[in-house]
Amino acid sequence: MGDIEQEINLDEITDESVLQNLLDQTEDIDDRKAIRARIQELRSVEKARREEKLNKLTNSREDRLQAKQKEANEQKLRTMAMYDSMAKSAPAGGDKRMDIGIYKSFDATPPGTPTGSISGIKASDLVEDALRSRQKAAEDRKKRVLAAYDAAARGAPSGVANREVNFEAFKKVDVSDYTPVKAENCSTFGSSGGVAKVTKAPSSQPGTPLSPGFPGGVAFPKAAEPDAMERMIRGRQQEAEDRKRRTLAAYDIVAKQGAGMTDNEMT
């Protein structure tokens, strides 16, 4: 050991391969112990250095992820604020206006405002308001479509296949009190105690049809009577159908009579 200390200072050696060569060349037990201790010390230092480097990389990665998440949250808050402003810019069914400036100039995290809120308004409240506005607008559109079809069904005469539906007339109509009602001339099925029952509506009474969807009783025009041309067309169609039935009946009689005749009788 004394020879090693005089010739080589182990504390100055930082290369593990050099120490390994010294260990292979040394036979003294004490010297070998000293070399092994130095090797273990170098390995401990290298391990600590690697762990520190790994921790820095991990922390840097987490910082980048947190920065991206913060940026995504701020973008989400700006988007919700812009759509919230657009939803409140006009009543349901009206022309809404989107202000891009809100998205560009909006401060998602103003001083003193907790994270996840916009000027004291929670982000969840904005989402709920936007969802409620969209749901109400969708319900109003549905009611307008149903009211337009209801008006077309009650305004056109019976038997007309192609009925014109005027959607434009119901675009700005207040349909908040309109309630779609199932046609009363159809059988309706209901469940009572797990047993299906059929309830038939009473026969319709003559008169001016009224829309049951409007409590105020908005009257629709009476079914127009067919004109002379339409009556003539219907009469000719009926005559053609009768003539067709008579012709088919005659062919049927001839076919039945000829089934039992021989070739000589037919000639």
Image (cartoon, rainbow, N blue to C red):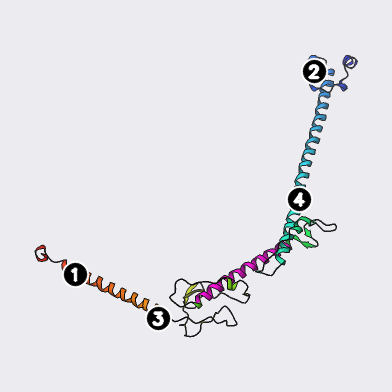
Residue located 50% across and 78% down the image: 155
The residue under label 2 is 23
Q: Considering only order in the chain, which callout, 2 or 1, is on the residue closer to the N terminus?
A: 2
Vertical relation: 205 (above or below) 32: below
The residue under label 3 is 228
Foreground of the two, 200 or 180: 180
Give the foreground label among 1 and 2: 1
User: Residue 142 in magenta?
Assistant: yes
Q: For mark 4, does the 10 Å Cα neighbourhood hold few (<14), some (14 to 19), or many (20 or more) residues?
A: few
Give the foreground label among 3 and 1: 3
Give x and y (percent) for residue 25. Answer: 79, 14
Give x and y (percent) for residue 151. Answer: 53, 76
- The magenta-colored residue range is 126-153
Q: Secondary structure at mark 2?
A: helix
Q: Secondary structure at mark 1?
A: helix
Q: For mark 1, does the 10 Å Cα neighbourhood hold few (<14), some (14 to 19), or many (20 or more) residues?
A: few
Q: Name the kind of residue labelled 3 in the image.
A: Ala
Give the foreground label among 1 and 4: 1
Q: For mark 2, does the 10 Å Cα neighbourhood hold few (<14), some (14 to 19), or many (20 or more) residues?
A: some
Residue 192 can be seen in this image: no
Q: Name the kind of residue labelled 2 in the image.
A: Leu
Residue 246 can be seen in this image: yes
Q: Name the kind of residue labelled 4 in the image.
A: Glu
Q: Considering only order in the chain, which callout, 4 or 1, is on the residue closer to the N terminus?
A: 4
Disc 3 from disc 1: Cα separation: 39 Å
The residue under label 4 is 71
Residue located 64% across and 68% down the image: 137
The residue under label 1 is 254
Q: For mark 3, does the 10 Å Cα neighbourhood hold few (<14), some (14 to 19), or many (20 or more) residues?
A: few
Disc 3 from disc 4: Cα separation: 74 Å
